[in-house]
Amino acid sequence: MLKFFNSLTRKKEDFVSFEKDTVRMYSCGPTVYYYPHIGNMRAYLFMDNIRRVLKYNGYKIDGVMNITDVGHLTSDADEGDDKMLVASARENKSPWEIAKFYTDVFMSDVKRLNIDLPEHICPATSVIDEIIAFVQGLLDRGYAYTTSRGVYFDIAKFPGYGQLGNDVNSKMAGARIEVDSEKRHPADFALWIKAPQNHIMKWDSPWGIGYPGWHIECSAIGKKYLQDHIDIHTGGVDHKTIHHENEIAQADCLEGHKVVKFWMHVEFLQVDGGKMSKSLNNFYTLHDLEERGFDGEDFRYFYFTAHYRKQQNFTFDSLLGARNSLKRLKNLVLEHKNGTNVLPKEKIEAYQNEFLDAVNDDLNMPVALAVVQKLLKEEKSKDVFDLVMKFNQVLGLNFESELEIPKDVLDLAQNRWMAKLEKNWAEADRIREDILKLGYVVKDSKDNYQIEKL
Ligand code: AMP
Ligand code: ZN
């Protein structure tokens, strides 16, 4: 039985979808005012992990992800600068150009990580009409009110507020003096914000020219593609108590019932013991890793080495460890390809069950990897190879690239790369000759190398 930890109930629960065979899944997408970092990528590898495990269990998926291409304010409290405007000024580009550029960077990164993308990817700016209709619906039902700054959600009208742990009443007691005296409760949040003159991204609405508050796009996009029942909603833990709490309030009040069944949150990727984040400017991008000779797959494997509900500390040493384990694993898989031993049927089934139990136990990837490693210790057998290929539907690693190339050539190429990194050019040239003699040529790009048959 497939089990996921639900942040709503704080328990592992049996997963049952609303429709029999298809899972409706929503993932909070990226803000596109700067380069995504590998902490963000942990969130999308987590999404990929869920999608692949669902498919492995025979489900189809109707998945949606937003792209936050509209500027929102710096803080969850609807205060501060508009990050898109800050980026526009920094790069001397229009907010539209900023959004296009960083959306492209994001798409290229997720491709290099072999992330299984949702069926629908929807920029917030493409659903302004839907957002306005959503806000109007909340006003009509009495869950929102207008002020001179825009439209606000009235949290006092929703008794379910705080399900994910946003304890607004205890916060109220020590709250600082409210900046916006028109708000009925300090935790009321903006649905629509009237735009100041200098604001670039703005749209006409029944409440004047403005732009959406930053929680509403996810609810409006979710409703557009998945209607009023969503099986799984994903995001990072930083989104849990404000963004997702507010999404629940908006959607449940509009529909009059609970919209999302499973809320799933991935813990932070840390760096030097702290959160890696765009605003703290302490982050690495996938490109930074590639510049040091790693590739997307190494980071993908690194993701599997920690459970998603635990913080994971990033260091280049641990990434190197992941890279080496992955290399070893690939070489072993290769050795099994032409193996002659036969794995008994019962053993095959036992391995299959062990692997399934691990991934179905709230995505326990470290245990799933241990199963694969145990399997690879069997006598060389094509059955082992076939089984790993089946498990690879979940792992999403690229065995094919290695499989066509003999192990001694792969090893030589790796040694040559290390020699190059150590600036040992003579050694690197000597190994290149050896590789040529075996009928292969190594081609270097800036951050990596490729091996081709002559
Ligand atoms: P953002 O573009 O900042 O909205 O982030 C995109 C996704 O990455 C969200 O789901 C965040 O919760 C998630 N995220 C941000 N920082 C981290 C981190 N250090 N580790 C894991 N997930 C993160
Ligand atoms: Zn969201």
Image: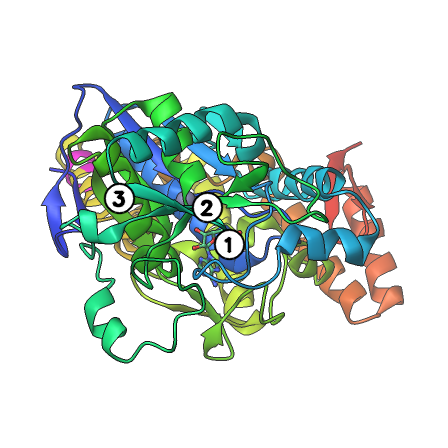
**Residue, x 15% and y 49% (percent of image)?**
160
Residue depth check, mark 2 versus mark 3: number of the one nearer the observer: 3
**Residue, x 43% and y 62% (percent of image)?**
77
Pointers 2 and 1 in contact (CB under 8 A)? yes
Q: Which residues are magenta?
A: 348-352
Q: Which residue is mark 1?
A: 40
Percent x, y for residue 140? 29, 30
Residue depth check, mark 1 versus mark 3: number of the one nearer the observer: 3
Q: How packed is label 1: few (under 14 Cα within 10 Å), some, or many (20 or more)?
A: many
What is the count of numbered marks?
3
Q: Which mark is first along the chain, 3 or 2? A: 2
Residue 350 lies in the magenta stretch: yes
Whether 206 is drawn above or below 287: the answer is: above
Using the rendered view, name the quadrant where residue 133 is placed: top left
Q: How packed is label 3: few (under 14 Cα within 10 Å), some, or many (20 or more)?
A: many
Q: Which residue is mark 2?
A: 44
- Inspect the image, locate mark 2, and give the three-letter code of the amino acid beneath it: Tyr
**Residue, x 72% and y 64% (percent of image)?**
418
User: Can you tell me which quadrant of the image ligand 2 is in?
Assistant: top left
Secondary structure at badge 2 equals helix
On the question of residue 209 being in view, the answer is: yes
Residue nearest the viewer, comparing 127 with 209: 209
Whether ligand 1 has any atom under 8 Å from the Cβ at mark 2 is answered as yes
The answer for how far apart the CA atoms under marks 2 and 1 are is 7 Å
- Inspect the image, locate mark 1, and give the three-letter code of the amino acid beneath it: Asn
- Inspect the image, locate mark 3, and give the three-letter code of the amino acid beneath it: Ile
Q: Which residue is mark 3?
A: 248
